[in-house]
Image (cartoon, rainbow, N blue to C red):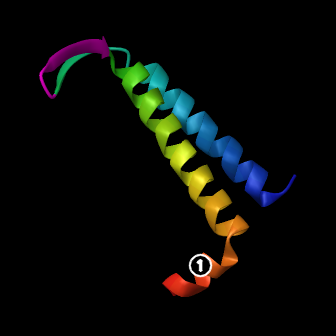
Amino acid sequence: MKVKHIVLLILILLVVIVLGQNTDIINFNILIWKVSMSRSILLAVNVLIGIAIGVSLKVRYRSNPKEKKKSN
């Protein structure tokens, strides 16, 4: 296995452990709405949003190298 795959597996394992340990119900406000949900769902949504942003930035800079050179 490549080092990249091993690191990815370790990160996935850590995320699963953190999600499993944070099952409490929490209340939080989004603008004018009050939301109650499991902390693990909130953390999972945040992780997925972060992954989506990372992948989209990687695809953007890989497909448009001229844009990358201008920003440096």
62 w.r.t. 67: above or below: above
Q: Quadrant of residue 37?
A: top left
Callout 1 secondary element: helix
Q: Of residues 57 and 15, which is closer to you in this image?
A: 57
Q: Is 60 left or right of 3, judged from the image as shown?
A: left
Q: Residue at x 64, y 44 (%)?
A: 10
Please check the rendered image and state whether residue 33 is part of the magenta-colored stretch, yes or no: yes
User: In this rendering, would 69 be left or right of 28?
Assistant: right
- In magenta, the rendered stretch is 31-37
x, y percent for residue 45: 45, 29
Q: How many marks?
A: 1
- Determine whether 1 is above or below 65 in the image: above
| Magenta stretch: dominant secondary structure | strand
Relative height, residue 8 to residue 48 (above, below): below
Seen at 59% across and 78% down, the residue is: 68
37 left or right of 21 in image: left
- Sort mark 1 into few (<14), some (14-19) or many (20+) by Cα contacts within 10 Å: few
Q: Quadrant of residue 66?
A: bottom right
Q: Position of residue 39 (x, y in %)?
A: 34, 21
Which of the pair 16/46 is nearer the observer? 46
Residue 49 location (% of width, % of height): 48, 39
Q: Residue at x 77, y 50 (%)?
A: 5
Instruction: Spot the residue most to the right.
Output: 1
| Along the viewing direction, whichever of 29 and 39 lies nearer the viewer | 29
Determine whether, in the image, residue 22 is placed left or right of residue 8.
left
Residue 28: horizontal and vertical position, in percent?
A: 18, 22
Membership of 18 in magenta stretch: no
Q: In this picture, is 54 found above or below 25?
A: below
Amino acid beneath label 1? Lys
Q: Identify residue for label 1.
A: 68
